[in-house]
Image (cartoon, rainbow, N blue to C red):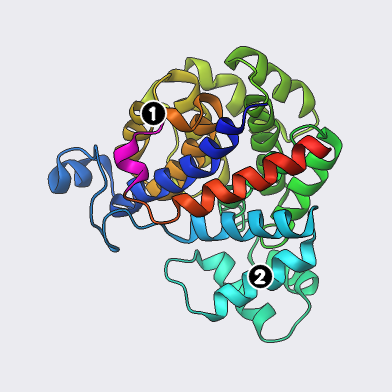
């Protein structure tokens, strides 16, 4: 394991989030009309270089893991609720509903089950996938705990099986990259380790190497975001080119950028992320500090 991969993962997530922020929800045609092509940090609904709820929730999870030493769902939910009460902007509708009900004093397990019953199948957004990378950093050497914590961290807000298994698949893949695996070896390992995942997810992942950009989903559906990130990682060996490609594809660009950035950062390391991008994102020092703490915990087992 190299500490630069851990740092690259969290910094890549934040940078990808910030790069995609100004074009969130736009089509490729709308992006072209307004920006030409996004190749650098730009202002959107927030100032240039700003991150969104994607980075905020990932760092909340990372802080809990770093301070507790292990995944503690009660602690993570308490932190999410405190963050929600401060009135952050840009929270996805599903996550907002869950956190608002928990903030009112109701038990979170009861809330997520109720919301799932009431709103399924419209509960398979990417809101748990976007924040789950710290699980891979903490448990990259313990596949059993990685899988368990990935499912449980998704269950905090997104208990739907597709959301949970997407987080687990992503973290298995991420854990191999953190340990220096190559692309084919890492993807093959993830496919084998997740052979019990829903067929729809596995089919998407099997097709990633053969798809063109226009065939890749970019919506807030969890399988679209997972596919988009894995596709970009598979087809690019340059951090900036992967991120530029993804955010200009439009759709849920900040989340797709965040998840792609985590993968590319873990694969290439911190040094591959353009310094000019890192210097524009205020959360980068915090990302590096937490990545280092999780690296130490991962070494301990």
Measuring from the top left, give residue 206's x and y in whole percent. Answer: 61, 20
Q: Secondary structure at mark 2?
A: helix
Residue numbers of the magenta segment? 273-279
On residue 242, which mark appears? 1
Residue at image x 55%, y 20%?
Answer: 207
Residue at figure coordinates x 49%, y 25% from the top left? 233
Q: Is residue 274 magenta?
A: yes
Q: Quadrant of the C terminus?
A: top right
- In this view, the residue in front, 43 or 195, is 43
In this rendering, position of residue 29 left or right of residue 231: left
The percent position of residue 201, horizontal first and vertical second, equals 65, 33
Left or right: 221 as drawn, with respect to 48: right
**Callout 2 environment at 10 Å: few (<14), some (14 to 19), or many (20+)?**
some
Give the quadrant of the N terminus: top right
What residue did someone put label 2 on?
79
Q: Give the quadrant of residue 242.
A: top left
């Amino acid at each position: 394991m190299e500490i630069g991969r851990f740092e690259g993962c969290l910094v890549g997530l934040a940078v990808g989030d910030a790069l995609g922020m100004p074009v969130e929800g736009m089509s490729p045609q709308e992006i072209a009309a307004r920006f030409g092509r996004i190749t650098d940090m730009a202002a959107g609904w927030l100032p240039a270089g700003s991150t969104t709820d994607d980075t905020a929730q990932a760092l909340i999870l990372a802080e809990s893991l770093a301070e507790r030493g292990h995944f503690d769902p009660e602690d993570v939910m308490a932190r999410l609720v405190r963050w929600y009460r401060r009135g952050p902007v840009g929270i996805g509708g599903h996550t907002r509903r869950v956190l608002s009900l928990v903030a009112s004093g109701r038990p979170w397990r009861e809330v997520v089950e109720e919301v799932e019953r009431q709103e399924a199948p419209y509960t398979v957004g990417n809101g748990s996938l976007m924040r789950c990378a710290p699980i891979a950093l903490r448990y990259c050497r313990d596949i059993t705990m990685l899988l368990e914590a990935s499912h449980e961290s998704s269950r905090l807000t997104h208990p739907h099986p597709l959301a949970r298994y997407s987080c687990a698949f992503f973290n298995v893949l991420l854990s191999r990259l953190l340990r220096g695996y190559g692309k084919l070896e890492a993807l093959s390992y993830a496919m084998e380790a997740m052979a019990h995942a829903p067929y729809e997810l596995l089919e998407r992942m099997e097709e990633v190497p053969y798809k063109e950009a226009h065939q890749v989903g970019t919506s807030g559906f969890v399988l679209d975001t997972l596919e988009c990130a894995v596709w970009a990682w598979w087809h690019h060996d340059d951090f900036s080119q992967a991120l530029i490609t993804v955010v200009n594809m439009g759709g849920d660009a900040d989340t797709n950028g965040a998840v792609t950035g985590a993968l590319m950062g873990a694969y290439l390391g911190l040094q591959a992320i353009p310094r000019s991008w890192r210097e524009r994102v205020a959360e980068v020092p915090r990302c590096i500090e937490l990545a280092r703490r999780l690296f130490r915990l991962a070494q301990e087992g």
